[in-house]
Image: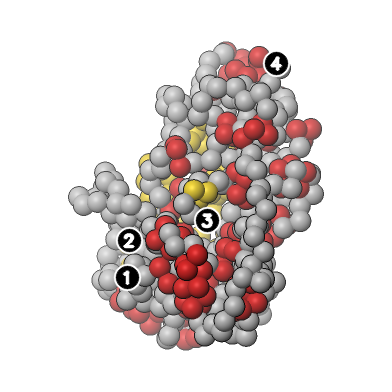
Amino acid sequence: MKQPRSFWMVGLGAILLAILAPLIAFWPKTAEAKEDPWAGVPIHPTHVDHADIVSGEFASGQDVTRACLQCHEESGEQMIHTTHFTWESRPYNVPWRDEPITIGKANQINNFCIGAQGNESKCMSCHTGYGWSDKRFDFADPANVDCLACHADTSTYAKGEFGNPAPGVDLLAAARSVRAPTRDNCGKCHFDGGGGNGVKHGDLDESLYFPSENLDVHMGGLNFLCTDCHTTRDHTIKGRMVADNYSIDPAEQVACTDCHSGQPHPDERLNLHTDAVACQTCHIPNIAVKDPTKVAWDWSTAGADRGDDHYTYLKIKGSFVYERNYQPTYLWFNGNLSYRYLLGDKIDPDQPTFINQPAGGINDARSKIFPFKLHVAKQPYDTVNRYLLQPRTAGEGGFWSTFDWLSALTLGAQDTGMKFSGQYGFAETWMYWPTTHMVQPKEYSLQCDACHADNGRLDWEELGYPGDPMEWGGR
């Protein structure tokens, strides 16, 4: 079997010849030139200080939300329809299923902590709601929305089990501290997604709380907030992650051309590359620049008393591999997926199972060569039914307390409604994460020889070319 890194290693890289303007997020969606990139950046209004507005005693998070809704009457109703609250997409028609199906953290699995069902005590500490403990959670009640998660000063507020306020939180002080969201608010979940700092994304980690310009030109050099690019309307935040979706409307996605021209270079030879190469490919030459990111996770080794170390082994989770200055994997990508593993999909345990597969190809005019982080895992599957299983880990009687895989998988099958034969093994899975943050200064962008040289980053044949396009021409 080919090793996952070597499968793409020959082809890691970019085509652009020199320096682009510092760009973010996604590829161009419009030919309209942006003469002034700052025209696309929202103005930050002065937020009303709530220190002298909020009063009263709050016995629960829901009490805080009810107080918020007295003035912000529509906010709760807006929030309960967002994916930040539902953790689930709209229904999709996918080619390999007869019925429409939703995709999201609420009901599908990944190859990090695997799944949320039955593990709400820990997973919901990053949910924008209170009290999601099981399937009886009321998604229609605006009082269950956690306003403080996104708006409180993070020095005054933290979430605990089932998404409720952590013990000891002064809810009145937290409510009086509310403000427009900052990187601190977003980072509490997005920098630490997957179980810790830098685990999941690689281009999002705690180094972005106070980044230098060399780490990220937008957040460090220009002091951008997350909401400067991920603009928000009626509590719907622009920018969607393909890991938890299948097909995304381009209007919902963040694009470099929201602020920048689609052809930003004074050299037309460089502008020719933008038809086939994403801005990120050259301007994010590496991720995990300061803090390492997890690139491999082996659940099969969990449960042993061999000494815990955050970067190599934890008894509750197994073995890990972390990398710093990670060089991305490069694939054609049109913004959607060609496949997303759904609970119950059959697997071949002798081959890697794709949790997600970016859609696109050399003949797809919407596709561009795009950088990804590839995360490889070994996770449990049913050897009789031949599908991946979600264990109960953090929940009552879960693996993190019993270290008994048979019991944890039996309970997990109950949580997800899956049939479990009682026979299990561990299968290799791959999951791709688009790289859009940690945009480097233009002086650090990839140069010609990063791709157009022997042993360059790109595997031209794997991408569908007969060879280096510089030698024969073409898209």
Badge 2: how crowded within 10 Å, few (<14), some, or many (20+)?
Answer: some
Q: With respect to residue 268, does 465 lie above or below? A: below
The residue identified by callout 3 is: 376
Q: Amino acid at mark 4?
A: Asp
| Quadrant of residue 265 within the rendered picture | top right
Residue topped by disc 4: 267
Tell me if residue 142 comes above or below residue 465 in the rendering.
below
| Point 58% across, 40% down: residue | 25
Choose the circle earlier in sequence order: 4 or 3: 4
Amino acid bearing label 3: Val
Question: Label 4 crowding class (10 Å Cα cut-off): few <14, some 14-19, many 20+?
Answer: few
Label 3 element class: strand
CB under 8 Å between discs 4 and 3: no
Q: Pick the residue in front: 117 or 33.
A: 33
- Report helix, strand or loop for mark 2: loop
Given the image, on which type of amino acid does mark 2 rest? Leu
Q: Which residue is located at x 72 percent, y 25 percent?
A: 18
What distance separates the C-alpha of mark 1 from that of mark 3?
A: 23 Å
Compared with residue 179, is residue 92 higher up or lower down, i.e. above or below?
above
Question: Residue 349, how many percent across, how many down?
Answer: 38, 58
Single out the mark in the foreground, 1 or 4. Answer: 4
What residue would you read off at disc 1? 416
* Image x and y of residue 149, in percent: 56, 67
Distance Cα–Cα, label 4 vs label 3? 39 Å
For the residues carrying marks 4 and 3, which lies nearer the camera in this image? 4
In this figure, which residue is indicated by the disc labeled 2?
A: 343
Residue 184 pos. (x, y %): 67, 61
Mark 1 vs mark 2: which is more N-terminal?
2
What residue do we see at 47% from left, 67% from top?
A: 69
Residue shown at 66%/72% (left/top)? 52
